[in-house]
Image (cartoon, helix red, strand yellow):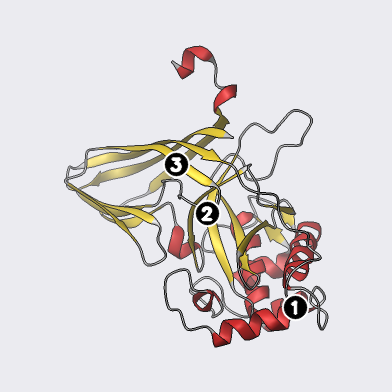
């Protein structure tokens, strides 16, 4: 599937801002069934400096500084990417979850994709006894790691309600879990905490969902903004699971970045020198290229 992406972020400030520094993670990742074809970002006002690098986890990151006084800061990212993933494995296959946990502890790699980095609590994902207890029902003794993670994903989809008004970006995981309501960020953090509580590696993945579903299929939750899901290490490979929609990650999902939690992969993060109120607007479009009207494609 060939996609055209647009991610438009606009900050509006009551008083002029004289300086801004931010990091952008908006480019589709390469690998795991994805092939980025193009990517460009237009920032207004134009940055004084812009430096691209790969962070510790391998995510493509652009660091900007803006020194022109402004009341509006606009980031317009556009990309094209091809996504062709193999079918997901059968949930009944793979190693027992106890064996996966043992392999993590015996691992020697400290590279950015090493499973060991994704087992401990992180800034947005504390390990809470009530969340670990919730996970245990999906992981009987000797059960498969992938089977357990798949069942946990389905349970979160059934037990939690998607409610964009129930939480905000800084809502603690424990409150979202107790309320059984939230958005994709909350559900992903909860699933990650549940898995890590049992010693299983789980990563937070940021990206997008296609905006237009295939004919006859329902529209997925989270398709109007950046989306988030979970990558679970099952002893030899990372497998993507989307607890918001209760589905495995296939060609409808486009990966941008992976980290321990949202703080590692925020699409836009930084600081400004200014005072007064501000507002934020985000608009996302993910459209299969064969669905783009001919005049727009031109």
Residue 186: x and y in percent read: 62, 61
Q: Residue at x 76, y 80 (%)?
A: 133
- Mark 1, residue position: 96
- Mark closest to the chain's N terminus, 1 or 3: 3
Disc 2 to disc 3, C-alpha distance: 16 Å
Q: Residue at x 79, y 30 (%)?
A: 216
Q: Is residue 272 left or right of residue 76?
A: left
Q: Residue at x 69, y 33 (%)?
A: 213
- Mark closest to the chain's N terminus, 1 or 2: 1
**Residue 96 sits above or below residue 268 on the image:** below
Q: Quadrant of the N terminus?
A: top right
**Residue 8 sits above or below residue 131 on the image:** above
Q: Residue at x 37, y 49 (%)?
A: 277
- Mark 3, residue position: 36
For disc 1, the neighbor class at 10 Å (few under 14, some 14 to 19, many from 20) is many
Residue 228: x and y in percent read: 58, 54
**Residue 3 sits above or below residue 121 on the image:** above
Q: Which of pointers 1 and 2 indicates the residue nearer the eye?
A: 1
- Mark 2, residue position: 206
Residue 218: x and y in percent read: 76, 37
Q: Which of pointers 2 and 3 indicates the residue nearer the eye?
A: 3
- Mark closest to the chain's N terminus, 2 or 3: 3
Q: Label 2, secondary structure: give it.
A: strand
Disc 1 to disc 3, C-alpha distance: 35 Å
Q: Could one spot residue 83 in this view of the protein?
A: yes
Q: Nearer the viewer, residue 109 or 115?
A: 109
Contact, CB < 8 Å: mark 1 with mark 2?
A: no
């Amino acid at each position: 599937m060939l996609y055209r992406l647009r991610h438009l972020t606009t900050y509006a400030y009551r008083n002029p801002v004289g300086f801004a520094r931010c990091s952008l993670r908006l480019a589709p990742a390469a690998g795991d069934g994805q092939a980025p074809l193009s990517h460009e970002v237009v920032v207004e006002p134009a940055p004084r400096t812009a430096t691209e690098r790969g962070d510790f986890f391998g995510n493509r990151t652009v660091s900007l500084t803006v020194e022109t006084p402004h009341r509006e800061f606009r980031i317009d990212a556009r990309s094209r990417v091809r996504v062709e993933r193999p079918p997901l494995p059968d949930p009944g296959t793979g190693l027992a979850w106890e064996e996966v946990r043992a392999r993590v502890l015996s691992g020697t790699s400290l590279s950015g994709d090493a499973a060991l980095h994704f087992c401990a609590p992180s800034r947005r994902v504390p390990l809470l006894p009530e969340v670990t207890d919730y996970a245990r029902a999906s992981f009987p003794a000797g059960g498969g790691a992938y089977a357990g993670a798949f069942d946990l994903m389905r349970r979160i989809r059934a037990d939690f309600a998607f409610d964009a008004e129930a939480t905000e970006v800084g809502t603690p995981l424990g409150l979202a879990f107790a309320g059984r309501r939230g958005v994709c960020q909350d559900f992903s953090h909860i699933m990650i905490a549940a898995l890590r509580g049992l010693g299983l590696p789980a990563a937070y993945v940021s990206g997008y969902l296609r905006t237009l579903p295939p004919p006859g299929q329902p529209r997925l939750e989270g398709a109007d903004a950046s989306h988030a899901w979970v990558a679970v290490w099952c002893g030899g490979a990372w497998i993507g699971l989307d607890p918001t929609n209760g589905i495995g990650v296939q060609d409808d999902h486009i990966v941008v970045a992976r980290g321990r939690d949202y703080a590692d992969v925020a699409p836009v993060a930084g600081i400004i020198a200014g005072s007064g109120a501000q507002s934020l607007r985000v608009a996302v479009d993910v459209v299969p290229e064969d669905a783009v009207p001919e005049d727009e494609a031109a």
